[in-house]
Image (cartoon, rainbow, N blue to C red):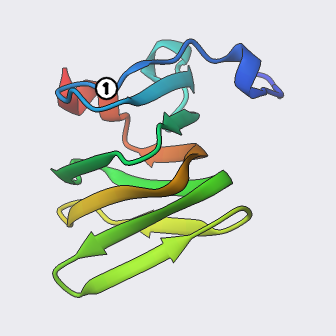
Amino acid sequence: MKVQKFNIADANLVRSPGQHADIFVGNLVDEKNGGPITIGYGRYAPGQSLTETMAVDDVMIVLEGRLAVSTGAGTVTAGPGEIVYMPKGEAVTITTQGEGALTAYVTYPHWAEVHG
């Protein structure tokens, strides 16, 4: 792989696998590119909620808007410029606040391989 730069216009946003909420993701680098991680963007519409047990280690960077990530241990909220780390095996509920959110993410290993 070579050094690359991306922006949201480069992402082909599709509905997040296995859910029906207005939550869309677009990988920019993944197993198809031969790298060890997946990176991409996520767009969460207002009033959305997604609950899942993390199949991979996931780092989510909030670019716009706000969201909350709840676990059995409590809830963290994040806004622009803040990062949320969700470790593999953690049961999380991600909920948008206000106008929704735009995020960037990095996962290890590739989440698409786990979700098939």
With respect to residue 41, does 109 lie above or below?
below
**Can you tell which quarter of the image residue 17 is in?**
top left
Q: Which residue corresponds to the image point at 53% horizontal and 35% vertical from the top-left?
A: 43
Mark 1 secondary-structure assignment: helix
Residue 27 on image: x %, y %: 52, 24
Nearest to the observer: residue 22 or residue 42:
22
Q: Quadrant of the N terminus?
A: top right
With 25 as the anchor, is 39 left or right in this view? right
With 12 as the anchor, is 2 left or right in this view? right
Number of callouts in the render? 1
Answer yes or no: is residue 1 visible: no
Residue 98 on image: x %, y %: 53, 57
With 82 as the anchor, is 110 left or right in this view? left
Q: Which residue corresponds to the image point at 32% horizontal and 65% vertical from the top-left?
A: 87
Answer yes or no: is residue 8 visible: yes
With respect to residue 17, does 80 lie above or below?
below
Nearest to the observer: residue 22 or residue 29:
22
Q: Residue furthest bottom?
A: 73
Binning the other alpha carbons within 10 Å of mark 1 as few (below 14), some (14 to 19) or many (20 upward) gives some
Nearest to the observer: residue 39 or residue 82:
82
- Which residue position is annotated with label 1? 112
Residue 114 on image: x %, y %: 21, 32
Residue 106 on image: x %, y %: 53, 46
**What type is the residue that disc 1 sits on?**
Ala
With respect to residue 113, does 82 lie above or below?
below
Q: Which residue corresponds to the image point at 20% horizontal and 66% vertical from the top-left?
A: 90
Q: Quadrant of the C terminus?
A: top left
